[in-house]
């Protein structure tokens, strides 16, 4: 027989073990609507934002001439390889025709190109010290830009959380506690003893 948890409600009808949660849900809360508008604007802005990858011409050349020729992919990942390569090829060809005097280059990429490239950089399977050194530099250069993308997405998630908390009439902290409790309850599984 399953264990049953008995909870004692407080004056609001909520267990003293759980977060204080309002019994009301207001889909049209003014604060939530304002936050959702900001979230939509930020989402639109981030979808169009080009992220700047700073690297050297040597690293970029290695990426285009070696990395893309040897990277492993599976199934539909072939589309990501082809599309990311196409996005970089235009910049690479331009840089070859007019090499930067400093040896450094900045590449502007859309979020989906950056993410797909970083996916393959992370799973790259190389051999030897020379390749390891070049690949390490590539990892470092792209990880800086990925950190910026992740920071932007975290800001978007925080706005969404604030909006949901406002709809429920609770603090963000209580909303996060409630979400964690729901997640914990869903991952426990049934007690079949």
Image (cartoon, rainbow, N blue to C red):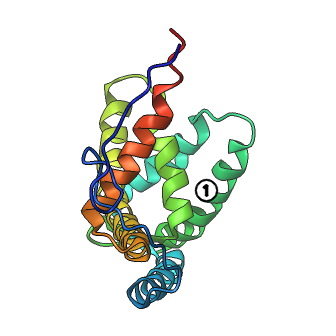
SS of the residue under disc 1: helix
Q: Quadrant of residue 5?
A: top left
Q: Quadrant of residue 60?
A: bottom left
Residue 14 or 122: which is nearer the viewer? 14
Numbered label tally: 1
User: Which residue is located at x 50 percent, y 77 percent?
Assistant: 43
Dot 1, crowdedness within 10 Å: few (<14), some or many (≥20)?
some
User: Which residue is located at x 65 percent, y 62 percent?
Assistant: 86
Q: Position of residue 141 (x, y in %)?
A: 31, 54
Note whether 107 is above or below 83 in the view shown. below
Residue 156 or 16: which is nearer the viewer? 16
Q: Position of residue 191 (x, y in %)?
A: 50, 18
Residue 124 seen in this snapshot: no
User: Which residue is located at x 44 percent, y 20 percent?
Assistant: 3
Residue 97 seen in this snapshot: yes
Q: Position of residue 70 (x, y in %)?
A: 58, 34
* Residue reaching furthest to the top: 193
Residue 12 or 19: which is nearer the viewer? 12
Note whether 173 is above or below 126 in the view shown. below
Note whether 33 is above or below 96 in the view shown. below
Residue 150 or 159: which is nearer the viewer? 159
Q: Which residue is mark 1?
A: 85
């Amino acid at each position: 027989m399953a264990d049953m948890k008995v909870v004692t409600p407080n004056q609001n009808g909520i267990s003293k073990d759980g977060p204080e949660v309002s019994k009301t849900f207001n889909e049209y809360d003014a604060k939530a609507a304002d936050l959702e508008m900001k979230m939509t604007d930020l989402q639109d802005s981030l979808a169009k934002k080009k992220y700047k990858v700073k690297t050297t011409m040597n690293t970029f050349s290695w990426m285009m001439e070696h990395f893309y020729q040897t990277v492993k992919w599976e199934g539909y990942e072939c589309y990501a390889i082809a599309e990311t390569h196409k996005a970089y090829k235009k910049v690479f060809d331009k840089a070859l025709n007019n090499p930067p005097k400093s040896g450094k280059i900045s590449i502007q990429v859309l979020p989906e190109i950056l993410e797909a490239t970083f996916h393959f950089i992370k799973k790259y399977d190389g051999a030897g010290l020379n390749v390891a050194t070049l690949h390490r530099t590539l990892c470092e250069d792209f990880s800086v830009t990925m950190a910026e993308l992740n920071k932007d997405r975290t800001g978007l998630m925080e706005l969404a959380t604030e909006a949901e908390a406002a709809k429920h009439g609770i603090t963000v902290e209580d909303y996060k506690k409630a979400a964690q409790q729901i997640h914990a309850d869903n991952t426990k599984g049934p007690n079949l003893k």
